[in-house]
Image (cartoon, helix red, strand yellow):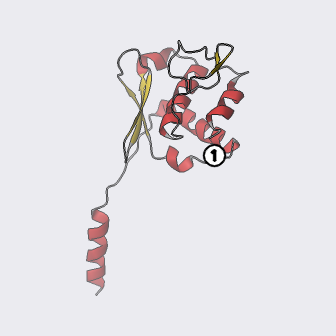
Amino acid sequence: MNSLRLFIFLVIFSCQKLEVFIVEDEFQFYLETFVTEGLKRNVNILQASQQINILFGTLSNSIVGQCQKSNDNHTILIERVYWDKASYLEREQLLFHELGHCILNRHHFDESHSGYCVSIMRSNSWICDLVYNSTTREGYLDELFKN
């Protein structure tokens, strides 16, 4: 009887797909910061953050980041040339925007106040001015995690 149980166990678990997610080293700190900022705002995304790929990739039409979602796999691609030239806060804002799509299921939000974006989830840079800096960061993150 033990052989039959072992056989059934092996059949069941050998048919399951083993998921491996890759986060390139340069993105790991930003992903951990995203999770921490969510927890500060009572949004627990730890499990979701462990089920995403974040990779460098080639994107077209001056796109510097993109969330690609499917039923069983979410991947963020970041343009390497942009990343290498970007400041810490520019990198954080870009990655948090894409994580907003992939993990928080946020859509673009183009509302502005006096010409300034109220969200890092804006769709295009010409819609409004995004002033993401050490002074405005907390407000933008409050808005990002509000839903």
Q: In terms of image quadrants, where is residue 9? A: bottom left
Q: Quadrant of the C terminus?
A: top right
- Residue beneath the point at 32% across and 66% down: 13
Q: In terms of image quadrants, where is residue 88? A: top right
Q: Secondary structure at mark 1?
A: loop
Out of 47 and 139, give the one closest to the viewer: 139
Out of 97 and 12, give the one closest to the viewer: 97
| Labels in figure, total | 1
The answer to whether residue 88 is left or right of residue 101 is right
Out of 137 and 88, give the one closest to the viewer: 137
- Residue beneath the point at 50% across and 14% down: 85
Residue 15, given in percent of the width and then of the height, sits at 27, 62
The local crowd at label 1, few if under 14, some if 14 to 19, many if 20 or more residues have their Cα within 10 Å, is: some
Please determine whether, in this image, residue 105 is positioned above or below residue 109: below
Residue 42, given in percent of the width and then of the height, sits at 68, 46
Q: Amino acid at mark 1?
A: Val
What is the residue that sits farthest to the right in this orientation?
135
The answer to whether residue 15 is left or right of residue 48 is left
Q: In terms of image quadrants, where is residue 53? A: top left
- Residue beneath the point at 56% across and 33% down: 30
The answer to whether residue 40 is left or right of residue 12 is right
Residue 70, given in percent of the width and then of the height, sits at 36, 42
Please determine whether, in this image, residue 81 is positioned above or below residue 23: above
What is the residue that sits farthest to the bottom in this orientation?
1
Please determine whether, in this image, residue 33 is positioned above or below residue 108: below
Give the labeled residue for mark 1.
Answer: 43
Please determine whether, in this image, residue 49 is positioned above or below residue 61: below
Residue 96, given in percent of the width and then of the height, sits at 55, 31
